[in-house]
Image: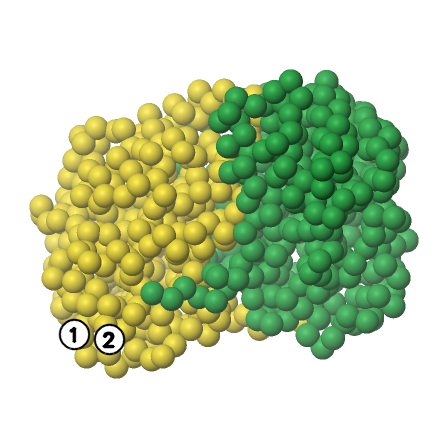
Chain colours: A green, B yellow
Amino acid sequence: MNLSQRALNVQASPIRKLMPYAQATKAKGIKVYHLNIGQPDIPTPPEMIKVYHEFSDKVLSYGPSQGLEVYQKSLVKYYAKHGVNITTDDIIVTTAGSEALTFAMLVVANEGDEIIVPEPFYTNYNGFATMTSVKLKPITTHAEDGFALPDDAAFEKVISPKTKAIMLCNPGNPTGTVYPKEDLIRVANICKKHNLFLISDEVYREFIYDGLKHTSVLTIPDFEQNAIMVDSVSKRYSACGARIGCIVSKNKELMQATLKFAQARLCPPTVDQLAANACVYLTDDYFAQMVAEYQSRRDLVFDELSGIEGIICRKPEGAFYIIAKLPIADAEDFVMWMLKDFQINGETVMAAPAEGFYATPGLGRNELRLAYILNKENLKKAMHIFREGLKEYKKTH
Amino acid sequence: MNLSQRALNVQASPIRKLMPYAQATKAKGIKVYHLNIGQPDIPTPPEMIKVYHEFSDKVLSYGPSQGLEVYQKSLVKYYAKHGVNITTDDIIVTTAGSEALTFAMLVVANEGDEIIVPEPFYTNYNGFATMTSVKLKPITTHAEDGFALPDDAAFEKVISPKTKAIMLCNPGNPTGTVYPKEDLIRVANICKKHNLFLISDEVYREFIYDGLKHTSVLTIPDFEQNAIMVDSVSKRYSACGARIGCIVSKNKELMQATLKFAQARLCPPTVDQLAANACVYLTDDYFAQMVAEYQSRRDLVFDELSGIEGIICRKPEGAFYIIAKLPIADAEDFVMWMLKDFQINGETVMAAPAEGFYATPGLGRNELRLAYILNKENLKKAMHIFREGLKEYKKTH
């Protein structure tokens, strides 16, 4: 029996594929600090958990394909707080950001069409592109300048008649980069010039440090018809398991078409939507505390990395990731070696090889993505093990 | 800004597109009995709701892409009860049957490949086919013989080098037909002869009447490499809003490829999986009562329909739908007329025009799908209104 070519070709998750090595390590009684996945350790807000506890419908029924109205209305308020003015008609609630990204690709691109993405990018974009038969065309950005957006010429060079959209992640996973407003306006102008959509993945909206401001694609003036925003509650409310996201656009025709795809899968999960709804009414304190915590973790990890000879990294402005270029040839080999052969007091560290975040073959082989999703005490231990491990690895490889 | 051709082409839900008419009717204070959607009215098991109430994780985190192990293990027990012997490796938990169907199409077919489906079929297969760029090739079945599977020649006629699978819904939505074992073996032999997968949508497994037996595709001897089963908890536990399903196959290579697609979207909802898990441990009483209730509803609706002159329908053996061929030209016009112009004591009825369940243009225009998902008292009222409405409509159209 032959599987489809796309089933054979679709990328195995570069983040998850090394998990069996971690499991083998743990089976030996060794503790593994996981800096490889974006699973926050911050408790899910009790206000959200309470909704599960109080769910009292007799029948756990389908909701509307566009999402529960009560939640759509709350989202309008949430976005208004961020200077994004929309109505419920501009929102379709999705099963996490994953589905929102899939819908965005389907609605802008036909089979074989192209979407431009700065690399390194969130590796699962590859999976959604395979599912929807879209080609991702990377433009390379660099650790040396903090993965800043390339100049117009770099975009113009890859734009073809098949290009339908540019896709950005802002704040960036895996880079931690927050794009300045003027850069976004520049990309918007490229989109307008070439009739492209701009898909903006903004799931890390609140994770912005040093008092910087986030610019949503939906606030760019005179750009309503081109702008598509993808969002998720996973990170901001430590609720990755709720699988609630949304796709937002003021382009009416686009939202009507998206709704047809949404109708095919009927609806996103009902109770999880109600739970996400409660989070919209958390006080500003919630985010202030969370951001302060992540900022201090970022400082810790960045300071530790900066103290290691030969590592290149720039202080990220957002999200909870940092990419480190290592003074070794093969970061994946280093990650596996750490799991198999290195430990301090029965503990080791796992990070994510960055190669899977690049589309251009060979790039990122000496880079790692670290997610600072542990408390500072554990982060400090993990970074100590990381530093000593790297020292040892360099001696022997 | 141009949308993709597939966004323009994807079918609007024929079930949901008439909902605005129903809303307008309700806004006038008229009660609408909904026989148009497959949303059961049976209460969700309290054992399931209890899981939401007792969820106590501090962090609502990602689960494994293949589903929570605890739930996979329970599913193994559930299927064993139905004579289906599998291991946890043969299961990937999905976000409802919808995602399982999408994965099945992606993994067996490339863009432009074909999957054969007996029509009328669950209309949302069209949406999944558009999303995955697969062509559905219908083989027509008929109300007159209870939508029985066509003979081998009918299958052979549409099989081409592009054919990758045959897809069945058993018990059938919208037909209510339960395929006899010998018919399934016959189709399995066609699949083996032509190297095709057989995708079997078995979400109505328990909804079987008159003591008949359901045959899962996974129990067909010497067919392990070809068989793919798609499932969902939505109907059997009245839990459509939980969005938990699964895809099951003993074809290892197929499951490994499916897992890669599953990794891209990270995981299905966590709490909903735990809730679904509790349902596996319901006593047999639960299903006995549920099936008895639906069987008596089926009898009621079938008897009522049989008493109406000019209607063609056969008593369905399963699911909770019945297709009625009406003695009028345009069933959709009749549905809209019922909503706009007909009522008895301030009440009317809504059914689903069956045209959207056919892929062959023009078929099903004089057919309706009725879902018997109301209690018998309301069903009786609804069928009375339906009969009188049809009488009146025939006079005036």
Q: Residue at x 52, y 62 (%)?
A: A9
The amino acid at mark 1 is Asp
Q: Residue at x 19, y 38 (%)?
A: B81
Q: Is residue A238 visible?
A: no
Which element is circle 1 on?
A: loop
Q: CA distance from mark 1 to mark 2?
A: 7 Å
Question: Which residue in the protein does label 2 denote?
Answer: B155
Outermost residue on the left side: it is: B211
Q: Is residue B275 above or below residue A361?
A: above
**Quadrant housing residue B93:** top left
Q: Is residue B303 visible?
A: yes
The amino acid at mark 2 is Phe
Q: Which mark is residue A363?
A: none
Q: Is residue B176 above or below residue B358?
A: above
Measured from the top left, where is residue A153 in percent x and y? 87, 68
Specify the subunit that label 1 lies on.
B
**Quadrant housing residue A167:** bottom right
- Same chain, labels 1 and 2: yes
Say left or right for B190 vs B9. Answer: left
Question: Which residue in the protein does label 1 denote?
Answer: B151
Say left or right for A174 vs A92. Answer: right
Measured from the top left, where is residue A277 in percent x and y? 59, 33
Q: Are marks 1 and 2 in contact (CB under 8 Å)?
A: yes
- Quadrant location of the N terminus of chain A? bottom left
